[in-house]
Amino acid sequence: MKSLIPVGLALSASLIAACSQVEVKTSKERMLLDFSEASDVTQIIPLEASVTHGELDGSAAEIHLHSSESHISGFTVRPNTPWDLSDFDNVSLVFDLANPRDESVSMYVSTTDVHGDFQMRSFAVPANSSQQYSIDVDVPELEIETGIRSNPESWKNDYQALIWRGGTKQIDTSAIEGIRFDVRGALSDKTLVIDNVRAVEPQAFNDNYLTGLVDKFGQNAKKDFSQKVHSVDDLIRASSAEKSEFKDSPAYERSRFHGWSAGPKLSGTGFYRVEKYQGQWTLVDPEGYLFFSNGIANVRMANTSTMTGYDFEHSLIPERDSNDFTPEDSLGLNRAPRKAWDTRFVRSPLRADMFTWLPGYDDPLGKHFGYRREVHSGAMERGETYSFYRANLSRKYQSNDIDAVMTQWRKTTISRMENWGFTSFGNWVDPGFYEMKNYPYFANGWIIGDFKTVSSGNDYWGALPDPFDPRFKDRAYATVQQIREEVNNSPWCVGVFIDNEMSWGIMGSVESQYGLVLNTLARPSDESPSKAAFVQQLRKQYPHIEALNQSWDLSLKNWEELEEGVSLKEFTDATVEDLAALLELYASEYFRIVGEAMDELMPNHLYMGARFADWAMTPEVRHAAAKHVDVMSYNYYREAVSDVFWDFLSDLDMPSIIGEFHNGALDSGMLNPGLIHAESQEDRGVKYQKYVNSVIDNPYFVGVHWFQYIDSPLTGRAYDGENYNVGFVSVTDIPYTPLVEAAKEVNRSLYRRRFE
C-alpha cells in the first residue's frame, strides 16, 4: 500500500510510517480508488476547491479547499459507477488522509447511496498528520438504538473511526454513489491529500463494547486519559489545588456589572441596554460602561443526568401538568417518589449493563437519581436517570446535604467565572444564580401549552406554535410573567431568551424554505388559525380568486376551495414571493406577541429573541424578528464567524449575539467531541480563541456564549443522547486547563480588542 507524502509538503517520518504500518485483519478488502492514474482525479468533484494529481509514492489526490472565501467548501469522492458492496457481510469504507498544514481541520462527511439516503459523520484531521480513517457503513452496531449519539467502536481495528452525526443507518450498499467531505465556516484555506479509498469487511467484533462502559465517577472505564479520577481523594485534591489558584485572579478591567471599567462611561439607566457606539453595536451595563457578554451557557444540573436502563410502575410517577412552564429536559433531576421505589425494574438491559456501579436508593449517593417522563430520542421512551456529575460534587464537597452541595457549587462556579475572566453567564443557568445578585446572567423561558401548532416539515425539536391561536398569546404572557417573578427586576439580568432553535425553514429549496407555509396552506382553515390568517392576507392582496389563480397558475373554483386546503407542487415567481410574505407574516405575529409581553411585563430587560439555529432560519424570519426583538440571537456551530455567511448582518443592522458554539476532542475519554472537532484539549483552546476573537471583531455582535459548562454524560444526556466533550469542566468537575487558559487570554484583552 502506498504511503501518503504530499509533494512539496513534508511530513515527519513517524507520521508517514503511521499510515503505512496499520495492519488490520479482515476477511475481505477491495481497493475502490487508488489514484494510480491521473484521470482518477476526475472522480473527485470539488466544491469551492481545486484538485490536482500528485506523485505521492505512486499517486494521490491533493485538494485545496478555498474555505476562507466560502461558507462551505469540500469535495466528493464519486466513482464513475456506484460501488456495489453488497457481497460484504459487513462493510467499512477506509481511506488515507493527510493534512500538511499547521492547523487541524474539522470536517463533515456524508456517505450517500443512489436513492439519496445518506449517513453523516464528522471527524478532525490533526495538523501535520497522515492517518487512516474508517466509516462503518454497515455493521451490527448501526441496528441498535443505544441512546448514545456516537457509540464506542464495536470492532477491533487500528483506524480512526468517524463520529456518527445522523442520517439513515441502513443505506443501500449495492449502490454507494459517493462520499462527500466538507469544511464549514472556516477562516483559512485548507489542504488535504486523499488516497487508497477501499472497502474492508470488519471482523473481531466485540460483543461487550457497551458493557461496563462507565465507572463509578461517570468516566470512561475502558480508557485512560490525562485527568482521569481514580478515587475520592483525587477529587478533593483537585478541588483544593483549584481553590489556591483563585487567590491569584488576573486583572480584567471590570466594572461592578462587568463592563469595561477602563473605557468610556455612557449614560447609565440602572439596567443593561444596547447602543451603537462609534459604529459598533454594544451592550451598556447598568452604570453606563461598555459591556460585551462573553459567557458560558447551560450552567445547571438539568442536562447532567443519563438514562440508567431502569424504570418504575408508571402509575406511581406524577405526570406533567399541562400548565407547566418548563420542558422536561430543562427540569432538575425530578426524582421518582419513594412510593415507586419498590417497583423498580430493568427496562433496558442494554442501558443497565453500561454501568459498572449505581448506588441504591437508600445510599447517600442515591440522592442523585432522577426521572424523565419523556425524551426526544433514545433507547427508552422514559425512565430513571442518574447524575454522576452531581454525585461527584457531593463526594468532592464531602456532604450529602444537596442544598449545601449546590450552594458550594454555585460559589465555586462564580469564582471560576471571575477567575477565568468571563463577563456573564450565557443562557440556561440555574435560577439559584439569579438570587445571588453578583454576576450578570440571562433569563430564559419556553412558551408551551395546549395551543395549536404548525409544521415546517423539519420539526427537529418539535412543532412550531400557532401564534394566531389566542391561547398562544395567553401562554406567552404567562411565560413572561413567570420569568418576571424569577428575575424580580434585578439589574443583574441582562436580558431574556424565549424558546430556542425553532424549525422556521431550511434554505436550499422552495419546499424546505417555505415548508411551514406550504404545510399550513394544505390544512383546512377551520383547523388552523395560521391558515385562516394566510387566506385572509391573500384575499386582501387579490381582489378575486381568478387573480390568485393567474398569479399562482392554479385553477381554484373559489376561495372556499383554498380554505379547504391546497397542496402546491409547482411555483411561479409570484407564488414564491407570496410564500415569503406569508412566512414573514407568521413570524412577525410570533415575535410581536412575545415582544409586547416583554415590553409590558419586563420593560427594563432586553428581549434577546429565540436563538436561531443557522440551519433553520430564513431571511423572512430574520426580518420579522428584527422588528420586535432588542437583540438578534443565533446558535452557530462552526470554526468561526466570517463575513461569507454573515453578510446579512449589515442589512439588518441590529445588535446580535451568538447563543451557542463549542468544540471538543477525543483525548478526554469521551466518545464524541461535539459538533466541531479539535484534535486535542490544547487544540480546543486554539479553536476557542479563533472563534471568540472573530465575534469580538465583528461590529454587529455584542456577545458570544459557549455551550456548555459541563461535559455531556458519557452515555448521553437523558433527553436525546448527546455525549459531547464540550464542557469547560468534566463529569468530575475538573476544568480543562488548556481551554481555561485560552479563555483567560482572550478575556484579558477582550475590551481593548473590541473598542480600541
Image: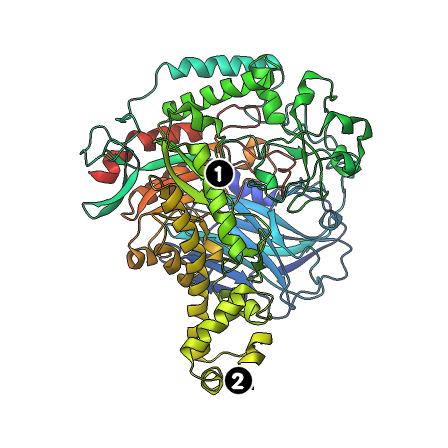
Local crowd at mark 2 within 10 Å, few (<14), some, or many (≥20)? some
Which numbered disc, 1 or 2, marks the residue that appears first in the sequence?
1
Which residue position holds label 1?
482
Query: Residue 14: where, in percent of width, then height?
Result: 52, 37
SS for tag 1? helix
Which residue is drawn at the image coordinates 36% and 53% (left, top)? 628
Distance of label 1 from label 2 (alpha carbons) = 47 Å
Which residue is drawn at the image coordinates 50% and 28% (left, top)? 729
Is residue 137 placed above or below 304 in the rendered structure?
below
Which residue position holds label 2?
554
In the image: residue 625, left or right of residue 393: left
Query: Residue 720: where, in percent of width, then height?
Result: 63, 43
Is residue 240 placed above or below 34 in the rendered structure?
above
Residue type at tag 1: Gln
Query: Residue 443: where, in percent of width, then height?
Result: 44, 37
Most foreground residue, 483 or 660? 483
Looking at the rendered image, the disc whose residue lies closer to the viewer, 1 or 2, is 1
Query: Residue 560: where, in percent of width, then height?
Result: 56, 79
In the image: residue 697, left or right of residue 227: left
Is residue 345 placed above or below 157 in the rendered structure?
above
SS for tag 2? loop
How many numbered callouts? 2
Q: Which mark is residue 513?
A: none
Q: Quadrant of the C terminus?
A: top left
Q: Examine the rendering and report whether any part of residue 739 can be seen.
A: yes
